[in-house]
Image (spheres, rainbow, N blue to C red):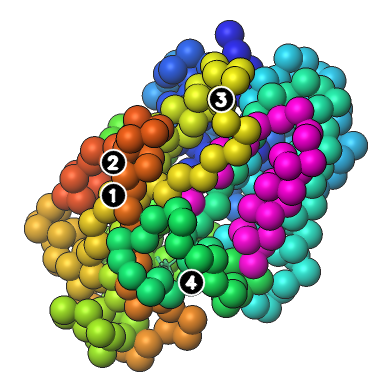
Amino acid sequence: MTKILVTGGTGYIGSHTVVELQQAGYEVVIIDNLSNSNINVLDGIEKISGIRPAFVKGDVTDITTLRQLFKDHPGIKGIINFAASKAVNESVQKPLLYYRNNLVSLLNLLELMPEFGVEGIVFSSSCTVYGEPDNNPIDESAPIKPATSPYGNTKQISEEIITDTIYSGAPIKSIILRYFNPVGAHPSAEIGELPLGVPQNLIPYLTQTAAGIRKELTVFGNDYDTPDGSCIRDFIDVVDLAKAHVIAMRRMLDNPKGEKLEIFNLGTGRGLSVLELIESFERATGVKVPHKIGPRREGDIEKIWAEPSKANNVLGWKAEATIDDTMRNAWRWQQKITPKD
Ligand code: UD1
């Protein structure tokens, strides 16, 4: 069985990817410092796949821990690197935390890969590297715009670090995946997004509002240059997204003569506005979401959605879930985690 290290594997996208890897026959080792996730996620993973992944509680920024992990789990062939901080606002307040967490962890992995014979790394990047696009849908050849937050900058710098390392002739491969807006949960409702505190992202805020945990959702702006005035995003189902990682891993490891570095957009190719998303949720679940229009949120992009043809044609991956299915899964998960009293 091919062994894969998943950093940040108890997190939102990480946990869904662990399940898909296991179901595709890979053996998974997780490292996570549990700073933004919960150890019980391992139970959820095990319930779905029937396999409890090996787990190391530790920080990828600590190279000693990481070296020990590679010694204790010999034969790791691939890495998927989810371990990173991802709150845009927080990154503005705590830039050094973001640069340390997101960059030092990547440096450590890249440095140790050749030493332990790890052949490839799949890296979680973001459509945030495109900034406000000149045209939509946006493909991988679009220019990278100056980052508007330390978080966004860490994604750009990480892509450059990987590119420079590959071009230096390091004996490794990489696939960089630029996610659009991951949403939803596993259809089993055993795993999903577990935000700590007040959610910053749209879907967890929306589902918490539907569950009565929050009074109402504020739509940040309805005066954008879009058909209904609210921002447009490309909402991609988290299970579809997870599956793309398995395909990317297989592509890297099974084609020794294949490209050393590739970049793919992961989105549906369909833009949906914030107001349309609320409507889909209400339609799919029959549950109303109290909401009001508020001022714009600083730093928001007006509209962005993916041109996913490269992922469709080259990777052989396509987003399949309908937005209604995704919303139903998000709601089922929210109901499961809502305190009952
Ligand atoms: C942001 C980042 C993205 C990052 C993602 C994960 C940017 C431009 N985008 O995505 O790179 O990967 O977070 O943390 O840096 N909204 C509301 N009300 C709310 C919450 C959100 O109206 O209570 C709106 C926002 O204005 C936005 C849309 O919903 O138009 C999506 O917001 P969000 O879920 O936070 O994701 P992004 O900002 O697109």
Please name whichever residue, 290 or 6, is drawn nearer the observer in this view of the structure. 6
| Ligand 1 picture quarter | bottom left
The residue wearing badge 2 is 319
- Secondary-structure class at tag 2: loop
What span is colored magenta in the figure? 153-179
The kind of residue on which mark 4 rests is Gly
Q: Is residue 162 magenta?
A: yes
The kind of residue on which mark 2 rests is Ala
Q: Are marks 1 and 2 in contact (CB under 8 Å)?
A: yes
Q: What is the distance, in whole Å, between disc 2 and disc 3 at their CAs? A: 24 Å
Circle 4 Cα neighbour tier, 10 Å, few/some/many (<14 / 14–19 / ≥20): many
Q: What is the distance, in whole Å, between disc 1 and disc 4 at their CAs? A: 18 Å
The residue wearing badge 1 is 268
Report whether the residue tagged 4 is closer than 8 Å to ligand 1.
Answer: yes
The label on residue 131 is 4
Q: Earlier in the sequence, mark 2 or mark 3?
A: 3
In this view, the mark in front (2 or 4): 4
Q: What is the distance, in whole Å, between disc 3 and disc 4 at their CAs? A: 30 Å
On the picture, is 153 further left or further right than 294? right
The residue wearing badge 3 is 258
